[in-house]
Image (spheres, helix red, strand yellow):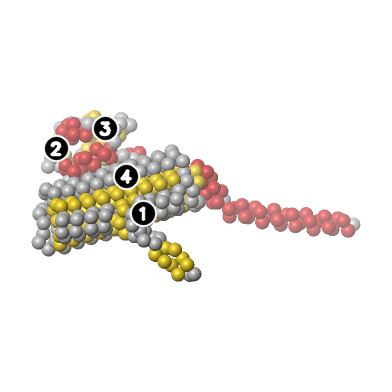
Amino acid sequence: MQKTLKEIAHIIDGEIIGDENIIVTGICGIKEAKEGDLTFVANSRYLPLMGQTRASAIITSMDVKTAPKSIIRTKNPSLAFAKMVSLLAPNDIRRPKGIHPTAIIGDKVKIGKNVAIDPYVVLEDNVEIKDNTVLYAGVYIGHHTKVGRDCIIYPYVIIRESVTIGNKVVIHGGTVIGSDGFGFSTVQGVHHRIPQIGTVIIEDDVEIGANVTIDRARFDKTIIKQGTKIDNLVQIAHNVSIGENSIIVAQSGISGSANIGKNVTIAGQSGIIGHISIGDNVVVAAQSGVTKSIPSNTCVSGYPAKPHIFAKKIHAFTQNLPELFKKVKQLEEEIEKLKSATKENSKI
């Protein structure tokens, strides 16, 4: 598919500076782009690359006034570029259709219109799959679980019993939803398992990465609310609540009964202890260890996590410790000299 720059500007509601008749035939990153490609710059640090790229045109923010190439200025370059990827990028992959004969389907299963079920999918009794949902090979869905419409469940996902999945949910390969929460009672050195009889609710428009684990609640529910996006290799424990439009980045872990607000960003390798609350619009920086509740509209970092500005000061002081140690050592030597001199003077 090819389009003129004028056509593209109309699609993404952008403003052209340069030749509106340029023909775009492909789409690529700014470093890899070639003649005929459309690319984008969303971060100011990459602005110098506009003079080096071979791309024919660039999508930029409204802050860019001039450029060595024809540009389309937009309010959100990343979102505009993503929209054009779906139109211009080649995509030879076709979604599966129909129900494969090797699928194992239990009793009283309800399957909506245009549902695709790949080889070796297992649907236990009383499962419900709504319209236009795709289940790839090897997916397992447990008893009494409901999956909404327009979902994509990639290979080898396990969704256990009595779980509810909303509409337009994407779940990537290897993820397990509804596994038992980690609950044991230790008596005289023996760990006794505590039954986990709650559920998991995944609301609409949630995307869950590969190899994520979301544990079922002990009694009530673990809930991931609408619009939240979860990266690969994330652990979410029992009875956790995550608010709307939050982002949980890879290798983060959230302990049981933590309450996460809406529009929260939890960056990579962060750890959050159980039974605390994180307010709305909070940013938890990478590798933070959150040990107490955080109020809304706060950015924290470090271990234990502190307000980011304060944590940066501590980090800066830590970098100066070797020099500080040298100075303390010098002062100690000077004090010893003064003590020796005082003793000598007292003898005279």
Which residue matches tag 3?
A: 73
Which residue matches tag 1?
A: 219
Estimate the spatial distance between the alpha carbons at disc 3 and disc 4, rounded to whole Å. Answer: 33 Å
**Identity, as a three-letter code, of the amino acid under mark 3:** Arg
Q: Secondary structure at mark 4?
A: loop
**Identity, as a three-letter code, of the amino acid under mark 4:** Lys
Quadrant containing the N terminus is top left
195 is higher (above) or lower (below) than 207: below
Q: Secondary structure at mark 3?
A: strand
- Taking the view exactly as shown, the residue that stands out farthest to the bottom is 189
Which residue matches tag 2?
A: 3
Residue 250 percent location from the top left of the image: 35, 53
Residue at position x 37%, y 56% from top?
218
Q: Secondary structure at mark 2?
A: strand
**Identity, as a three-letter code, of the amino acid under mark 1:** Phe
Which numbered disc, 1 or 3, marks the residue closer to the eye?
1
Estimate the spatial distance between the alpha carbons at disc 1 and disc 3, rounded to whole Å. Answer: 51 Å
